[in-house]
Each structure stands twice: as C-alpha cells, then as structure tokens.
Amino acid sequence: RLAILLLLLSSGQSRVNLAADDRALVNQVQAEVSILRQGVFRVLNDKELETAMKLTHPAIIAAAGGLERARENATSSARKQATSLFKIEKVEFLDPPRFFAGMEYEFVLVPVAMTMSRADRTRNQSFTFYLGGRKKGDASWVYVDAAKLSQGKATDYFPDYPEETKFP
C-alpha cells in the first residue's frame, strides 16, 4: 500500500484523499444521497426525480432500459412503497463520508440510516451505503447503492476503484 501511495504521489496525483472535513463537499454528498435514499420510499416531485436520475450511475439507467424507463420504474416502485403505510421519519448520516481517489476518479462512501414509522408507532430502521464517483475535475457525482454490490463489483461502475479500499 505504501508503494501505491508513493507511486500516486510521484505521478502528480495531488488529491489522494479529499478533505473529509470540507463541510461544503460533505453537505453536497449527504444531500444528494438523501434524495436518492428517499426516492426509494416516497414519490419524488418532478425536480427531485430529475435530480435523482442525474445522480444515478449511467450503467444503472442503461440497465433499466434508458432514462424514461428508469423514471417510470422509480416512480412505480415508490408508489408501491408509499402504500405500505410507512412514512419516512428521518434520514441520518451516522458516520462521515469517506473520500478517496483512484487514478482517474474521486470516490466517496456514504453510510446512511433511515427511520420509517407507521401510525400504529411501528418503526423500521434501515442502513445502507452509497458509492459515489466522479472523474477528477468534474463537479458532479454519480452513485450506486453499494450495499447491493460485492466488493469486487465496484469496478463494474468505476474501473479504477482501489481494491484495497473496503466497503463499510
């Protein structure tokens, strides 16, 4: 690992680790993941849905059959969840996002918890994490729900995902 770090530093990679304490960046990725997470359990308004589509990794959009089909699937799935009588109580980020970089991409792992409740006071809490990536120099992140991925599948979405970086 030290050899990899030295190689990255000597190759001019100035941002091996993004500053986890960069509050604006942390706020950005947490707000984006919050929209994605809520979109699974409630019907998003048009603006939120468009934002969610922009934040979703293009391979996921393609696997859904394209952008229109992905929109339809997201809305249909959220409508089914909405009939479950569970309402989103809160979305929380219990741990800070972890930022790191590969040769071509910058990455973030964002752990997230969501609490849902019903009128009868039944509560349900779910935990997951999202893997975000963007090409170095880009401002926009795209994400995948990484809890559904095995460690080795991260490279299906981001070819230079560092194998030594473990999922939470």
Image (cartoon, helix red, strand yellow):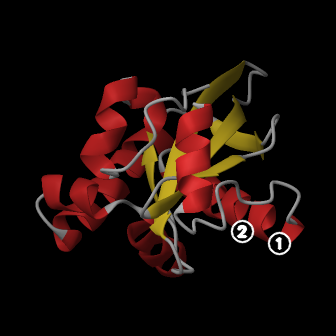
| Amino acid at pointer 1 | Ala
Q: Residues within 10 Å of mark 2 (few under 14, many from 20)?
A: few
> Which secondary structure lies at badge 2?
helix
Any part of residue 78 in sight? yes
Residue 133 is left or right of residue 15, and the answer is left
Q: Is residue 25 above or below residue 40?
A: below
Which residue position is annotated with label 1? 24
- In space, the residues marked 1 and 2 are separated at their CA atoms by 6 Å
Q: Position of residue 6 (x, y in %)?
A: 61, 47
- Numbered mark located on residue 28 in the image: 2
Q: Nearer the viewer, residue 102 or 4?
A: 4
| Amino acid at pointer 2 | Gln
Quarter of the picture holding the C terminus? top right
Residue 65 is left or right of residue 77, and the answer is left
Q: Position of residue 163 (x, y in %)?
A: 43, 32
Q: Position of residue 104 (x, y in %)?
A: 42, 64
Quarter of the picture holding the N terminus? top right
Q: Nearer the viewer, residue 118 or 47?
A: 47
> Which secondary structure lies at badge 1?
helix
Q: Is residue 122 above or below residue 67?
A: above
Residue 125 is left or right of residue 1, and the answer is right
Question: Please, which residue is most extreme toward the left here?
Answer: 65
State if disc 2 and disc 1 touch (CB < 8 Å). yes
Any part of residue 83 in sight? no
Q: Nearer the viewer, residue 131 or 104?
A: 104
